[in-house]
Image: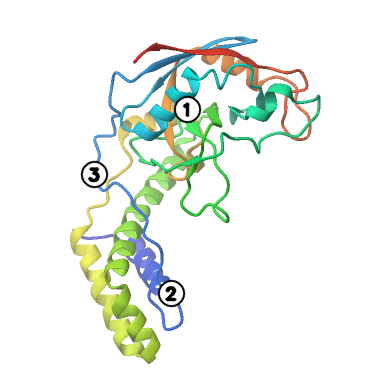
Amino acid sequence: MNINPGMKKFLSAVASLLIGVTGACSQTTTATMETSNQPEAGGAVVELKTTLGDITVELYNDTPLHRDNFLKLVGESFYDGVLFHRVIDNFMVQTGDPKSKEAAPGEQLGAGDPGYTIEAEIDYPRHYHKYGALAAARTGDAVNPERRSSGSQFYIVTGRKVPESQIQQLEAGLMNQQLQAYFQNLTMQHRDTIQQLQAAGDREGLENLRQQLIKETEENVKPQPLPEQVKLDYVEKGGTPHLDGQYTVFGEVLKGMDVVEKIQKVETDPSDRPKEDIRIISAKVISK
């Protein structure tokens, strides 16, 4: 496949970073080269009764670790009584911190969890941060490079409508991710050779290998454009596309986005905690 000049330049830059005389080989990342962009249908349905109304969510079957963990916590009544402790208008509403159940007014929240994290199940663009998406919160990349999810905290996306002028940027970013992921996997396969060439200071050998891997990437990767449904959702309904590929999206709201809208509009303190507590009264499984 012919890769356009912009992508070729990007790939060359990535290659220079990953294979250099003094640089180290990067960790592997993954990206879906081809996808139907359709989550598995018929997932479990959970009802969240809140102090502002009911929210019904569906959990995706193709994110089984997050689905099963969420159902386990619901079955244990873990979410009963937790606050929506972080609320940002036109962005998202977040909950699931067990420490929030007995929190004093104004107490800063967001560090609580059940004592474990969950392996990332990031599958972009099949799952993306559209309006109404259900996603797992997590700590930042600096302390969590594997992007493991919090064991209990999650957020529901509201976001903003995306101008059509930005859609092309999103599409180019997705294609670049696919090229980079493939090239990174190649560098991991050649890691021993790269380290030997680096140790020997063999600049010519490193450059030859770099060009070889660039050529192999160009010949084997067929970057997929952003699916039409993703573009349509972002333009017509909105979301937070800048989070795509970084957090695990594992479900979506079926009913109750009017309640989510109410939550995101409440007055908050400087820590984004609502000044008047908003709780999940109870969570129960409607269907599996």
Under circle 1, the secondary element is strand
Q: Is residue 88 visible?
A: no
Q: Quadrant of residue 20?
A: bottom left
Comes first in the chain, label 2 or label 1: 2
Comes first in the chain, label 3 or label 2: 2
Quadrant assignment for the C terminus: top left
Q: Read off the residue under disc 1.
A: 134
- On residue 34, the disc is 3
Q: Is residue 151 visible?
A: yes
75 lies above or below 243: above
Residue situated in front as seen by the camera: 183 or 285: 285
Q: Residues within 10 Å of mark 1 (few under 14, many from 20)?
A: many
Q: Read off the residue under disc 2.
A: 24
Q: Quadrant of residue 8?
A: bottom left
Q: For the residue marked with disc 3, what is the amino acid?
A: Glu
> Could you tell me residue 97's position as x and y percent?
62, 30
Mark 3 touches mark 2? (CB < 8 Å) = no
Q: Nearer the viewer, mark 1 or mark 3?
A: 1
> Could you tell me residue 148's position as x and y percent?
48, 45
Under circle 2, the secondary element is loop
Under circle 3, the secondary element is loop
Q: Residues within 10 Å of mark 3 (few under 14, many from 20)?
A: few
> Is 235 displayed left or right of 228 in the figure?
right
96 lies above or below 54: below
Q: Residues within 10 Å of mark 2 (few under 14, many from 20)?
A: some
> Could you tell me residue 81's position as x and y percent?
64, 17
> Could you tell me residue 262's position as x and y percent?
63, 15
Quadrant assignment for the N terminus: bottom left
For the residues labelled 3 and 2, the Cα–Cα distance comes to 29 Å
